[in-house]
């Protein structure tokens, strides 16, 4: 297997195996084959279908959540971005689709997904998902080639659940897969931005989706570190962002957040009908939300 961008003496584990340039696997790819495969994955993405999927995600999230709330500000970054996210819920997939057509509508968005899951949900390839094969050198090499190709575009954006599996937001420490550190060496011009997600019930029937972007880290800064140190730096940044979001979420103070998407108010059909009748009988205004400041 050809060199995948590791400095001599830094050939640490990628995806659970040693990044040994002499290792041979049944799935061995050279650079040209990996880039050709990545180009095919990019070609499968349909902007028109992504827009339709984004509209579906917006509608579905509005139906199932009370609000999508942002702590802090949206990132203002020129150049390619790697979003480094936690992965607390199945809903994350729809959040990706919604973000890719709203917050990052002007971006060229892609997201890696474990190959077995993408085989089950192959339609997601049309929306920008691409297959990764964890725990193999060939899979790591293919992922890095695809990511590098996406991030060559100044509007390129990767959404990566850095731990590669579902984890409760309270679990610590954050443990990113080591491939991110090697990605920084392939794309030193990209900005690595932590993004924390949390799903929280407050005072309404439906939950809130809370989100917060952390301080960006330049790819060149990470590339200058040894892989283990770069991975630790990403973990620290995401963990700090998650902790700040958890503290704000526990306060249940809507004033600390801005609203990115308004979902449905109300408690339930029967209760809301009774409340509406009472409001009509008393001549008062019917307030569907449980709290006026929600």
Image: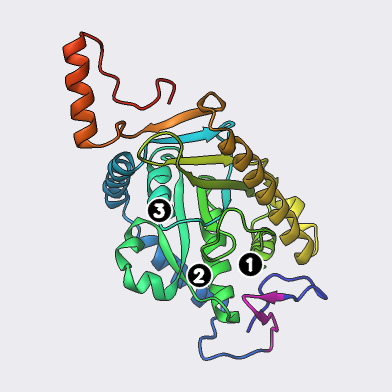
Q: Relative to 282, does residue 14 appear above or below in the rendering?
A: below
Of mark 2 and mark 1, the one earlier in the sequence is 2
Instruction: Tell us which disc is closer to us: 2 or 1.
Output: 1
Secondary structure under the numbered disc 1 in the rendered image: loop
Residue tagged 2? 35
State the image coordinates of residue 156 (x, y, percent, origin top left). 51, 49
Q: Main secondary structure of the magenta part?
A: loop
User: Which residue is situated farthest in the right direction here?
Assistant: 9
Instruction: Tell us which disc is closer to us: 3 or 1.
Output: 3
Specify the quadrant of the image occupied by residue 247: top right
Q: Are marks 3 and 2 in contact (CB under 8 Å)?
A: no
The residue at the point 59 percent across, 31 percent down is 72
Q: Is 283 colored magenta in this rendering?
A: no
Q: Which mark is residue 91?
A: 3
Q: Which mark is residue 177?
A: 1
Q: Is 21 colored magenta in this rendering?
A: yes
The residue segment tinted magenta is 13-22
- Depth order, front residue of 119/264: 264
The residue at the point 23 percent across, 24 percent down is 275
The residue at the point 57 percent across, 46 percent down is 195
Of mark 3 and mark 2, the one earlier in the sequence is 2
């Amino acid at each position: 297997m050809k060199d995948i961008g590791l400095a001599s003496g830094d050939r640490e584990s990628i995806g659970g195996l040693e990044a040994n340039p002499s290792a041979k696997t049944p799935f061995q790819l050279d650079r040209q084959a990996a880039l050709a495969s990545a180009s095919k994955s990019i070609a499968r993405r349909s902007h028109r279908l992504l827009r339709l999927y984004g509209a579906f995600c917006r509608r579905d999230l509005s139906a199932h959540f009370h609000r999508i709330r942002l702590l802090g500000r949206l990132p203002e970054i020129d150049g390619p971005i790697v979003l480094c996210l936690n992965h607390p819920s199945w809903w994350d997939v729809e959040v990706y689709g919604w973000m890719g057509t709203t917050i990052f509508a002007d971006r060229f968005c892609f997201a890696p997904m474990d190959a077995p899951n993408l085989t089950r949900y192959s339609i997601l390839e049309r929306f920008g998902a691409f297959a990764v094969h964890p725990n193999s050198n060939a899979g790591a090499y293919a992922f890095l080639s695809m990511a590098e190709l996406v991030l060559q575009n100044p509007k390129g954006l990767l959404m990566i659940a850095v731990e590669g599996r579902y984890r409760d937001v309270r679990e610590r420490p954050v443990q990113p897969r080591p491939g991110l550190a090697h990605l920084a060496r392939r794309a030193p011009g990209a900005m690595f931005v932590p993004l924390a997600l949390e799903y929280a019930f407050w005072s309404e029937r439906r939950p809130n989706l809370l989100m917060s972007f952390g301080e960006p880290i330049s790819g060149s800064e990470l590339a200058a570190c040894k892989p283990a140190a770069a991975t630790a730096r990403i973990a620290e940044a995401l963990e700090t962002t998650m902790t700040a979001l958890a503290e704000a979420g526990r306060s249940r103070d809507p004033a600390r957040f801005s609203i990115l998407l308004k979902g449905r108010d109300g408690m339930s059909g029967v209760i809301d009908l009774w409340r509406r009748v009472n409001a009509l009988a008393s001549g008062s205004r019917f307030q569907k939300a449980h709290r006026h400041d929600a």
